[in-house]
Amino acid sequence: MEEENQAYQVKLREFEGRIASGEKIEPGDWMPDEYRQQLIRMISQHAHSEIVGMLPEGAWITRAPNLRRKMVLLAKVQDEGGHGQYLYHAAETLGATREEMIDALLSGKAKYASVFNYPTLNWADMGVIGWLVDGAAIKNQTMLAQCSYGPYSRAMVRICAEEGFHMKQGKEMVMRYAQGTDEQRIMTQDALDRWWWPTLMMFGLPDDVSTNSPALKRWGIKTRSNDTLRQEFINELIPELYLLGFNVPDDDLTFDEESGNWVSGDIDWDEFWRVIRGDGPCNKERMETRQKAHDDGLWVREALSAYAERMQKRAEA
Amino acid sequence: MTDTQWPRFEVFLQDRPETSHRNIGSVHAPDIEMAMMNARDVFVRRPSCISLWVVPVDAIYAKTVQEIEADPELFRDRLGDESSVDKYDIFRKSSQRRAMTFVIYTGQVEATSPELALQKAIEIFGDGTTYVWWVCPERIILRSQESDIPSMFAPAKDKEYRQPRDYKVVSAMQEVKREQPGKGGR
């Protein structure tokens, strides 16, 4: 027992040394169980978020105001499906199976980003989601592209390159509407009012209460803290939104001369937990839509399997 | 029929003629042809692909250097059947630098088993630093052809709106700033 523990400590030190020197851990390398479990949890939640994230925007594809906006939205939603695939792959290299992960999502056991449980009520939501929600996601993903696990880091490098398009098409739309008609400005401000707080929650719990963070930091998975990323995001967004003549729904927002930070009012973490635990405005609808897509696709999967089987038999005959 | 999981296929993508195929992820499919189609849909939404290879995961003999070091018996008593010499494609990861850590095609060896192919690969290609080795029989890999380029890869070129550079938001924001000095401050 004592010897086993010593051997473990030696391996752990070697593992942490590799991470400290900037090496990536690859499938097959030794890793602590907790590193594997934390990564599976994070990566699969991230994959689920991409897949569920297709739904709020997907609902507007048929209602896009012109062909260009329609092609852009279609391409963005398709990218999100692709990103979900890259991420499921990364989790599979750690021993999780695609089947387990999808089951966990559909049965409601798995979590995904709470922001996707809010409804998309008008067309300007497409612009605001792109600029705010994708902009916030990029902050997190740019950090994760440097993480210590090789397959996750490589998936993130690819995702970041593609997310740039998502954020910029949204920002372009918001800027255009800022300079547009009264109706467009009102519509955009309405979208900002609804998405501002859910976006700030995307960065996760404050540093002093986030329980997962210490291990993730020590093992080079998260190299920057939730609050640091959130503050950076607020500092970038506020001046530009003001410049465009928009507001955010935060009466307590102040500028702190000393730190140069925009300091936001209190985030409603009770709401965050309510939505995460299933009681958000669209949780039920999202899962029903996902389940329906899964069920409706069954005949295609069955047909492909039947075809593959028949070809296999023919080849053997 | 039950709704069960299909086998997984690793995907290798080549960006330009002067670069080698690199592993970019995997797809699930009922057979290798479908895996090629899925790989195209999942990994070629941007115009940076001229060739794709797909291969079933269990056809790849993969070892990290850590695994090789931990198993001194790895290359012992594994003489293959001399009558069944195969060509093996060799892939390796040789960098830990950001965005450069892919498992990349390196070359080919002939051997009678994957273990012996790995042993040979280490002799031939192992002079630099290597962190991961993948060995795969050449004949099992499905490769896209030159003639597939127009239908599989070229269409992505027309979709400029998928590129961030198609959106001039940085210069547009500077324009707004110039027009409204003093706004956007505290």
Image (cartoon, coloured by chain):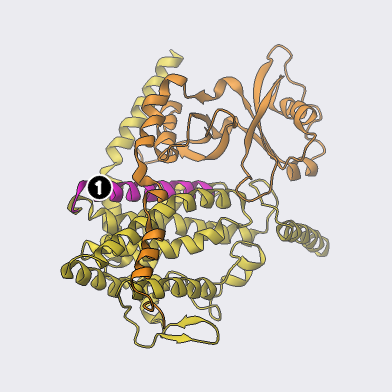
Chain colours: A yellow, B orange
- Residue A76 vs residue A203: left or right? left
User: For the point 74% across and 14% down, which residue is it?
Assistant: B82
State whether residue A84 appears in this view.
no
User: Horizontal and vertical percent for residue A64?
Assistant: 20, 53
User: Horizontal and vertical percent for residue A25?
Assistant: 66, 51
The C terminus of chain A lies in which quarter of the figure?
Answer: top left
Q: Tag 1's secondary structure?
A: helix
Main secondary structure along the magenta-highlighted residues: helix
| Residue A72 higher or lower than B103, as above or below | below
State whether residue B78 appears in this view.
yes
User: Horizontal and vertical percent for residue A276?
Assistant: 38, 70
The N terminus of chain A lies in which quarter of the figure?
Answer: bottom right
Residue matched to label 1: A68
Tell me which corner region of the image, top left, top right, bottom left or bottom right, holds residue B59. top right
Q: Give the mark count.
A: 1
| Depth check, front residue: B95 or B2 | B95
Q: Give the range drawn in magenta.
A: A65-91
As for residue A149 lying within the magenta part, the answer is no
User: Horizontal and vertical percent for residue A193?
Assistant: 28, 75
- Residue A68 vs residue B128: left or right? left
Mark 1 falls within which chain? A
The amino acid type, in three-letter code, at marker 1 is Arg
